[in-house]
Image: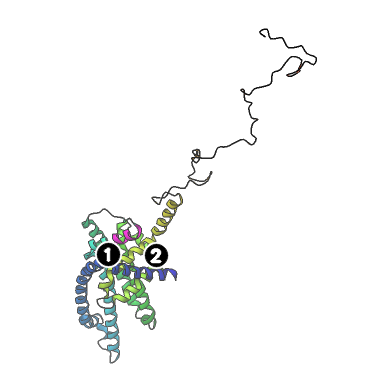
Amino acid sequence: MRDLAGGFGHLLAGQRWVFRNGRWLGFGLLPGLLALVVYAGALVGLGYGADDLTAWATPFADDWGSPWLGLFRGFLTALVFCLGLFTAVITFTAVTLLIGQPFYESLSEQVDRSVGGDAPESGLPLARELWISARDSIKVLVRVTLYGILLFALGFIPVAGQTVIPVIGFCVSGFFLAEELTAVALQRREVELKDRLALLRGRRAMALGFGVPLVLAFLVPLVAVFLMPGAVAGATLMVRELRGEDEEQAAGDGAEGSDGAAHPGQPAQQGYPGQPGYPAHPLPQQQAPYAAPQYPAQSPAPQQNPYAQQPPQYPGGGGAGGAAGGHAPSPNPYR
């Protein structure tokens, strides 16, 4: 259920992106308008000729009485027209993408740049890309035709043919419509058709959530033309999630931000010893200028002044007058 809502969310996100960038919406209408004119003429012709086609295909019912003949051929006529409409919905996208291949590829690249910064490029010439797109579209059309024939046959089952089978038909149409739209972004990533189908089968609910609402919307005239540019943008966003590119980008941004080097202008964080990025031989820390001098805990004894006058010392320790136990001072010879 989460993938189902996620696919529808990508469809809405693509439409919002295109309407915010009106220039891409304007150019995207031209291929869709051209394809719409072609398909409208084909469906009108089918509507007028479906009765003759069913009458030619069921000659055994010519002898049936009323009302069984009218009900039977009327039911077959409706089935033929629904089959034609079913085929038109699928091939409309392929033809429109083929007509507008250069534009839609540029649109998809711009979506990638606006979200992830980088846009993968196939590097193939335009003629080669058109050939690959046409070849893959034919392969998808063959698959769709086989499913359509099978569903057409199952439509004759009472009750289930009028209830369950149309629902299955819309789901099949939505899945292959999602494949056609995601092919624009996946071909730039050089993903082959079988790998694209395997990728969508792995997230089938997301593909249905994206494609089935588009199938229902494409049944309304002119709606497909206006939704095509946004559908390509939304398919590009869905491809990024299917391939996990958004998670890889988020993981890479987180890894760059953790070492402090991902954001210019901010100093790199060295961390703590033992952590990655910490230098093996860190530089010694510099002392702050004008630091206060460091003194020992106890001051040394003050030094004596060598120029201070000391009292004379006499033999016998008598001091200045000392005659006690000593010798008498010598008489002054010049007196």
Question: Which residue appears at 26% of the width and 79% of the height?
Answer: 81
Q: Residue furthest top?
A: 333
Q: Choose the circle earlier in sequence order: 2 or 1.
A: 1
Quadrant assignment for the N terminus:
bottom left
Q: Is residue 37 magenta?
A: no
**Magenta-drawn segment:** 107-116
Q: Which mark is residue 157?
A: none
Give the vertical position of 90 relative to 186 (above or below). Answer: below
Question: Which residue appears at 21% of the width and 71% of the height?
Answer: 35
Give the vertical position of 280 relative to 149 (above or below). Answer: above
Horizontal side of 31 relative to 149 (left or right) equals left
Give the vertical position of 185 relative to 295 (above or below). Answer: below
Q: Which mark is residue 201?
A: 2
Q: Which residue is mark 1?
A: 137
Q: Nearer the viewer, residue 48 or 237?
A: 237
Q: Nearer the viewer, residue 88 or 246?
A: 246
Horizontal side of 256 relative to 48 (left or right) equals right
Horizontal side of 96 relative to 178 (left or right) equals left
